[in-house]
Amino acid sequence: MTPERPGPDEPGDHYFTAEPASADERRTLSVELAGAPREVEVAPGVFSPGRIDAGTSVLLRQVEPPESAGTFLDLGCGWGPISLSLALAQPQAVVWGVDVNQRALDLLRRNAVRLGCDGVRAVTADEVPADVVFDEIWSNPPIRVGKAVLHELLRTWLPRLAPGGRAYLVVQKNLGADSLQSWIGRELPGLTAARLASSKGFRVLRVSREEPGG
């Protein structure tokens, strides 16, 4: 993923580095994606390799899948639960899964092939063409890296929403979800942030870019 918070599934390994130090031991995992059980490939050294993490689960439950095909971004894709869910919901969409972790990107590519998700593009940030804008951005962002890094990440990607576009961010309530909502509205011109849902200690924020003249 993008720089992320250490978790219980990967003690001692830094999955927010480009090349994880842990052994690349692949295995299959059964998870529910887009309303059906799916077999995916996972490995140590990536975010939440043993399950879909709690925040991502809340995001996938609380936000309706896109109503039509478009260009979507999964910011911090890991092995791909969000990217794959978007691609399964809208097979004609282009889904950019962005991560710094090369093992995670390889897993997403392999999982996309496994599930027939031809529109998935698993890339590092600098591989996304500068002229690409997004109809939707979905992310479980790296809150624990600190405000400066997090804010720079959001300053980089949220302004790339297309007119009328939406971003959905899941953030733990006790790690500053409400203050992040305020910061987005105050610091990112042309974007508004609102709380869409609360569940299991998480907030889901919806960030909107209005249509011109709206």
Image (tube, rainbow, N blue to C red):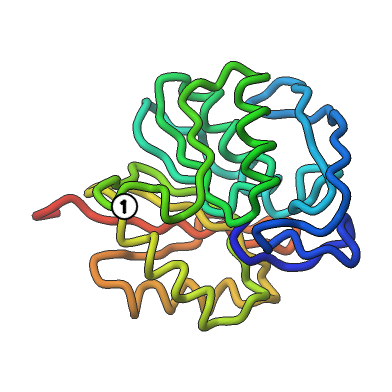
Direction from residue 41 to residue 99 in the image, left or right: left
Query: Measured along the vertical axis of the image, is residue 87 above or below residue 156?
Result: above
In the image, is 124 to the left or to the right of 209? right
Where residue 201 appears, x then y in whole percent? 73, 63
- Image quarter hosting the C terminus: bottom left
Label 1: which secondary element:
strand
Q: Amino acid at mark 1?
A: Leu
What residue is shown with label 1?
161
How far from the left and from the top, in percent, is residue 109? 61, 32
Left or right of 209: which side holds 34? right
Quarter of the figure with residue 69: top left
Residue furthest toward the top?
116
Q: Residues within 10 Å of mark 1 (few under 14, many from 20)?
A: many
Residue at 79% in and 51% down: 48
Camera-side residue: 127 or 203?
A: 127
Q: Which of the two residues, 52 or 205, is positioned nearer the viewer here? A: 52
